[in-house]
Image (spheres, grey):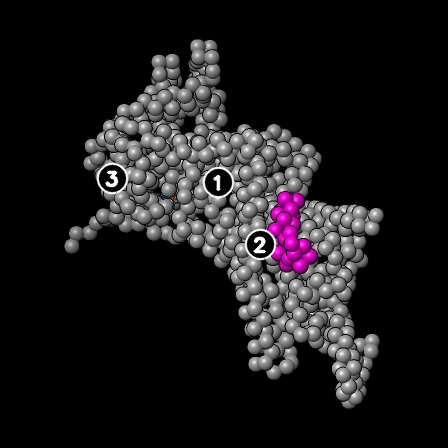
Amino acid sequence: MEKKTTRTIRIALAGNPNSGKTSIFNRITGAHQKVGNWPGVTVEKKTGYTDFKGYRLEVVDLPGTYSLTAYSLEERIARRYIIESKPDVVTNVIDGGNLARSLYLTTQLLEMGVDVVLDLNMWDEVCKSEAEYDLQKLEELLGAPVALTVGHRGDGVDSLLNMIVELVENRSERHRHVPITYGSHLEHVVKDIATMIEKNSSVSNHYPPRWLAVKLLEGDEEVKEIFCESNSANTELKQAVEAAWTHIHKTTGSDPERVISENRYGYIDGALREVISERPKDRMELSRQIDLVLTNRLLGYPIFLVLMWLLFQLTFSLGGYPMNWIGTGVEWLARLGTTAIPPGLVQELIVDGVIGGVGSVIVFLPNIMILFLGIAFLEDTGYMARAAFITDRVMHFMGLHGKSFIPMLMGFGCSVPAIMTTRTLESRKDRVLTTLLIPLMSCSARLPVYILFAGVFFADSAGNVIFLIYLTGIVMAFLVGRLFRKILFRGEVAPFVMELPPYRWPTLLGLTIHMWERAKIYLKKMGGVILVASVILWFLGAFPRDLDYSVDYDSQIRSLERMGTPEAGGQITRLRAAKASEAIEKSYVGRLGHLVEPLIRPLGFNWQMGVGLLTGFVAKEVVISSMGVLYQVGEETQESESLKEALGDPRHGITPLVALGFMLFVLLYTPCVVAAIAVRREIGTRWMFFSIFYQLVLAWGVAFLTYQIGTVLGTG
Ligand code: GDP
Ligand code: MG
């Protein structure tokens, strides 16, 4: 038998964010990955393999970029990979409905002299539009074969792979190198400089000279570094570039960088005029119309706020129904546990510890799913990018730019992945500052606390109160950010352009997947951290067992029982309650709560709240479950008083004002241990301690002011 060594073809997928690269990548490699929608999320290098017609295809999903200048991290990653790793083929994935913008990147790929296959993705949407493309013309003009795909369905991916193989085998007639021309002003300058570079073989063997020439004229810092070594050739080159720069500046009145990019657009425009017979009423056009309203200087902000407000209203009001069902289910399970398991430690552990603890958290799953669904909807439609755009202007106020908005926004879901996304920021200052501020974005784990407390103490306006809490977090981030920028991180903010992808109707499947991905994290947390924490808390609450009670409750109860009168029955109930609450107070958890009590008394918090906050370091969901355990144990003599009723019980001394302060405290202090670990991993141990410290101070301060000012206003 003939033995063949399989040849490897290395393929890089390049394209704008949201062009469908990851979809195509997943289709080719079969790797299961998140299909994100944010520019910046796919910063990690993803590699996959597949076997195709006797070849081994090695595919890399490059970060989405609109250009290949060295301004952003994504662009640098993509560019470096193409230049240094020299893939056999660069597949340029393009939103077929939006050639005009996508081809900007294509021109730069062609300029780099790499073998490009053009993949017009989203072809399903092109078909639906009235656009008519002369694809043959496009191939001719750009000198690159064109494939048509529908990425999320996988249509056309096989023929794309065929084209790639053909290109590598040199069988593609459609392939040739086409220089991008820059018009009379620039063309001869570029040529001259390229010729000079060509003589320097140590450089021109590694990089295409023409590309280097263009980059030098653009003032590209990375490329300049290639020539930094001081020798006569480099000095001569530098002088030539400077002379050319001045010449262009003088003749055109603007700097070469702009002239070059204008020429690229001009080139594209010219090409498109030949390729597209009828300019489509493309999505971009429609999007532009929508954006006139949604990103309007005046209307943009109110619309943004109304949408966010709606989201939280929906989360609360709609989530109420399934929440009640689950609550009933949990209660039923607890009753079942009480009857099925003989009284004693095991029963207490299962009913109070496990069911009570986990149960009080799981009821919030519907709310969280609704919130995530809402966020997924805003992301998938493209509105989130607008939100980023709108806030970009505002972000400058705290010394950050739009790019930090994405990690901060993710902070509303969970601080941990959000903190990890700060890696995409170029400057360390931005990274540290963003990481410090992310925890102030109220993560979804805190939501149950708000839902519970706002529901009990602000029943009629719970949605508004929760919205206000979220808003407070954002406002705090602004104030703290501004302060830190002034004190800790002085310096300029790098300019950054925020791109707006076209609006798109999200698919039900996409929404479900995005929602589920997040809900899964919540559920996982419940199974792990929260279960363990609940059991530990139950233990701390149930032990030590042999307590010295201040009163001999048991003998008093026994003698009352012997009397058997109706009045005695009432007294027994009161005695049992007193015993139980003394027991919990003298337990380990009670002692712990009392230990921190002096610290939180100025905030109006009781010791149970203190325990809740302490345990909240483990995870914010635990705040609720620990209070669930505390109050259920404390009230076991009363007929199944739910946590809600227990909190609202005036005897516990929690007023709406205290509840508000408590919610603010929960909002502002460290999200959880895992988040702290993430902070440490990204920016170091010292910053981690700093972040925990400043958040505690902030939380305490705000809760203190709320309580004190509220009390003065209330009595005054
Ligand atoms: P990337 O940012 O370039 O990696 O793009 P993704 O692969 O994450 O795709 C962005 C969005 O476009 C996702 O919601 C995909 O489901 C969707 N998408 C991808 N390819 C197509 C396509 O061919 N047609 C349509 N209608 N949607 C697509
Ligand atoms: Mg992607």
Q: Which of marks 2 and 1 is nearer the N terminus?
A: 2
Per the image, the residue denoted by label 3 is 163
Front position in the image: 524 or 82: 524
Per the image, the residue denoted by label 1 is 383
Residue 689 point in image, percent of width and height: 67, 49
Per the image, the residue denoted by label 2 is 316
Q: Are marks 2 and 3 in contact (CB under 8 Å)?
A: no
Q: Inspect the image, locate mark 1, and give the three-letter code of the amino acid beneath it.
A: Tyr
Eye-nearest disc, 3 or 1: 1
Determine whether 216 is above or below 98 in the image: above
Task: Please indicate whether residue 199 sits to the left or right of residue 407 in the image.
Answer: left
Name the residue located 46 percent from the left edge and 40 percent from the top edge: 382
Eye-nearest disc, 2 or 3: 2
Name the residue located 27 percent from the left edge and 41 percent from the top edge: 160
Name the residue located 40 percent from the left edge and 31 percent from the top edge: 285
The CA distance from mark 2 to mark 3 is: 52 Å
Name the residue located 69 percent from the left edge and 74 percent from the top edge: 638
Q: Which of the 4 image quadrants contains residue 326?
A: bottom right
Task: Please indicate whether residue 556 sits to the left or right of residue 331 in the image.
Answer: right
One can see residue 164 in this view: no
Q: Do the residues labelled 3 and 1 touch (CB within 8 Å)?
A: no
Residue 452 located within the stretch drawn in magenta: yes
Q: Which of marks 3 and 1 is nearer the N terminus?
A: 3
> From which residue to which does the magenta span run?
449-472
Task: Name the secondary structure under disc 3.
Answer: helix
Task: Name the secondary structure under disc 2.
Answer: helix
The CA distance from mark 3 to mark 1 is: 36 Å
Front position in the image: 147 or 360: 360
Q: How crowded is mark 1: few (under 14 residues within 10 Å), some or many (20 or more)?
A: many
Residue 187 point in image, percent of width and height: 35, 16
